[in-house]
Amino acid sequence: MEKYNSGSSHNLFIVWEGIEGCGKDTQIPLVGRYYFSVKDDKYDRNKRNTVIMTREQTKGIHGKLIKRWFDSGKDITYDPETLLYLFIKDRKDHLATILEKNYFQRFEGEERNVILCGRYYYSGAYQLTQLLDKTMEESPNQNYEELRQKYFDYIFKPQLPFIIPDLTIYPRISGETSLNRLKKNRGHKEMFEKKASFLERVVKNYLFVFDMFRKRGHDIVEIDGEQEIDKVFSDTVKVLEEANIGALDFTKFGRDEPKITREDYEKIWVAEAPFLDEIIESKREEAHIFFRRFE
């Protein structure tokens, strides 16, 4: 897995990963505002940087379909291939509408874009867990580690051409902490948030995924997400400063969302129509054809 974007951009792409409740959506705006307000004369005042906050799944057509599927209450834990396909399609939308244009944008001076993103392809740890759970339940005598390596290749091979983050921050928490925070802050549980045991398996697979990508040169840093927000934030700033991402003077700060065309709106209307089962079935067929290309 080559770092095809290495050296091709002086912009920054920083990702936050982790299970629900680890603080991704809390820390990203805190970090953005912190650097946006930097006023230190020792920094080069000629530098101008733009912060772009974004996340996955997006608000594009495939992201909306994923959300629609989640909100329907339908059990999709035994259809991980189709869900993985939709996440990859949504990620391609994200790359096309936000990530690529901002990451590879050229500036005459020292201005640069800094993309802060909640989740990226490492969250395939969720689909890895689903695939393993499904297969081991159907065929419990299979070699778990061999199967995990097989599914790792299955999930990430189609995503080889995608931009590689300059830095990934992983606030690690337990499945129990995740559920406790979700109950407190949201008052409900989404599909992946129902069982602490499942989330614990996701955490283990996150660590496996990170280990595989570190071997390929990815810069991934784990911090203790069990701490209070202020402590997690201070640890995050320390990681960024150690990575030489501290000397930033931002002139613009905001969110960037996919631009949706009229045609997309029509597709979204279809995705939100009552016949969700028929739409998912068509996506299931698309997924089968898609993954066969990488066998």
Image (cartoon, rainbow, N blue to C red):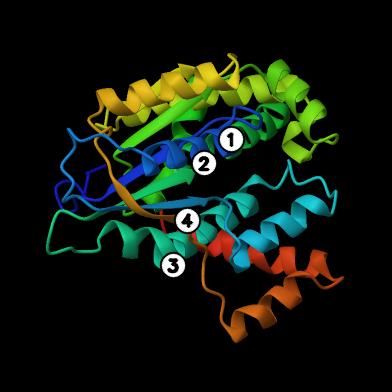
The x and y percentages for residue 221 are 37, 23
Earlier in the chain: of badge 4 and badge 2, it is 2
- Mark 3: which amino acid? Thr
Q: Which residue is mark 4?
A: 254
- Mark 2: which amino acid? Pro
Earlier in the chain: of badge 1 and badge 3, it is 1
- Are the residues at dot 3 and dot 4 in contact (C-beta closer than 8 Å)? no
Mark 2 or mark 3, whichever is nearer to me? 2
CA–CA distance between discs 1 and 3? 24 Å
CA–CA distance between discs 1 and 4? 15 Å
Mark 1 or mark 3, whichever is nearer to me? 1
- Are the residues at dot 4 and dot 2 in contact (C-beta closer than 8 Å)? no
Determine whether, in the image, residue 129 is placed left or right of residue 182.
left
Residue 29's tag is 2
The answer to whether one can see residue 139 in this image is: yes
- Are the residues at dot 1 and dot 2 in contact (C-beta closer than 8 Å)? yes
Residue drawn at 33 percent across, 42 percent down: 165
282 or 61: nearer the viewer: 61
Q: Which residue is mark 3?
A: 97
- Local crowd size for mark 4, using a 10 Å CA cut-off: few (<14), some (14–19), many (≥20): few
CA–CA distance between discs 2 and 3? 21 Å
CA–CA distance between discs 1 and 2? 6 Å
Q: Is residue 227 above or below residue 25?
A: above
